[in-house]
Image: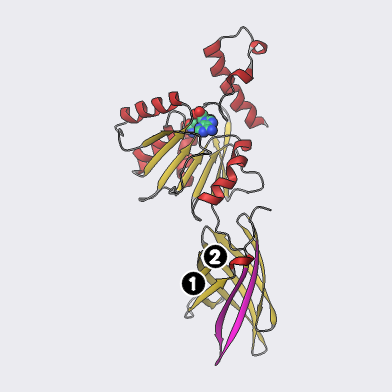
Amino acid sequence: MKKTLYLGIFALAGLLALASPSSLQDLNWQQYKIYDVPFVPTPPEVVDEMLRLADLKAGDILYDLGCGEGRIVIAAAKRHGVKAAGIDIDPVRIGESNDNAAAAGLGGKVRFIQQDLFEADFKDATVVTLYLLTSVNLRLRPKLLADLKPGTRLVSHSFDMGEWKPDKTSLVATSCDDQRDVHFWIVPANVTGRWEWDLAAGPRKRHYTLQASQQFQAVTASGTGGDRPLAINDIGLVGDEIKFRLEVEADGKMASFLYEGKVMGDTITGTVRPADDAKAAAVDWKAARDPKTIESIVK
Ligand SMILES: C[S@@+](CC[C@H](N)C(=O)[O-])C[C@H]1O[C@@H](n2cnc3c(N)ncnc32)[C@H](O)[C@@H]1O
């Protein structure tokens, strides 16, 4: 609420400068509310933290949705040499972005697109930055989860994503004499449903099943090994990389195995090794999912 308020106050201050009504009461806010979010630039210290959390590397493709006058896009391209693009619905902002990019020596090296971000195609992004409002983030969330590849990083100045809890949050002191949250998420793969695989257990093969539920990046699972229930612990999902510990009874003793793999659609490929012995040889692991068992990760 407080964040919405200060974004609103900055916007109103800007509008007052333009419209100069005699008092706040004279300002008819609705007449200015043509876009989903007013233009307020991210302070430089917050841009720095957003790019630090994004951990930009060669090959990354960054989009700033609602790019304003382009400062995040320009900083990403100039400092990290990555491909970067900004999308803004306001043609004035796109004009300013292009001017600022040219002044920064980036003419032709960054792209600015005048479009409604809800209609834009940014599927090739590996990093998406946002300074919108929580209400807008929540409307955008289904598109982000549907369109972005697992592993894509999202960074939002101030505003969160509701029940999709951030993987990290930083607090930044700004030159505006306040503090801002910067939230970071990694788009998770959907690993819900029933997975199955076989693994050697001594001279025989044992059949395993795992039933996974998921709320955003948080996964819980139960399973069976042969005809026995299995405990599945310490499940971690980061983008398309999953790991968990599976407790199995073998020869009357309990043993713990560490599974690590990469999710690609309805297949996970990876390795299994004894959890308490990092030097033990790993064996290959491949699990397949029944696609009919997939559920939504938004509960
Ligand atoms: C708070 S400013 C953020 C500017 C920039 N990202 C930054 O952090 O400095 C939000 C921007 O979103 C733009 N915007 C609002 N609604 C939009 C929409 N539906 N599609 C694209 N841009 C939009 C506004 O024009 C404004 O420039």
| Residue 207 colored in magenta in the image | yes
Q: Which mark is residue 242?
A: 2
Q: Which residue is mark 1?
A: 270
Q: Position of residue 127 (x, y in %)?
A: 46, 46
| Residue 158 colored in magenta in the image | no
**Above or below 247: residue 55:** above
Q: Residues within 10 Å of mark 1 (few under 14, many from 20)?
A: some
Quick one: which residue is furthest to the bottom in this view? 203
Q: Position of residue 40 (x, y in %)?
A: 52, 26
Which quadrant of the structure image shows residue 11?
A: top right
Secondary structure category for the residue under label 2: strand
**Above or below 251: residue 291:** above
User: In the displayed structure, does residue 221 sit left or right of residue 205?
Assistant: right
Q: Amino acid at mark 2?
A: Ile
Residue range (magenta) = 194-213
**Marks 2 and 1: in contact by CB < 8 Å?**
yes
Quick one: which residue is furthest to the top in this view? 22
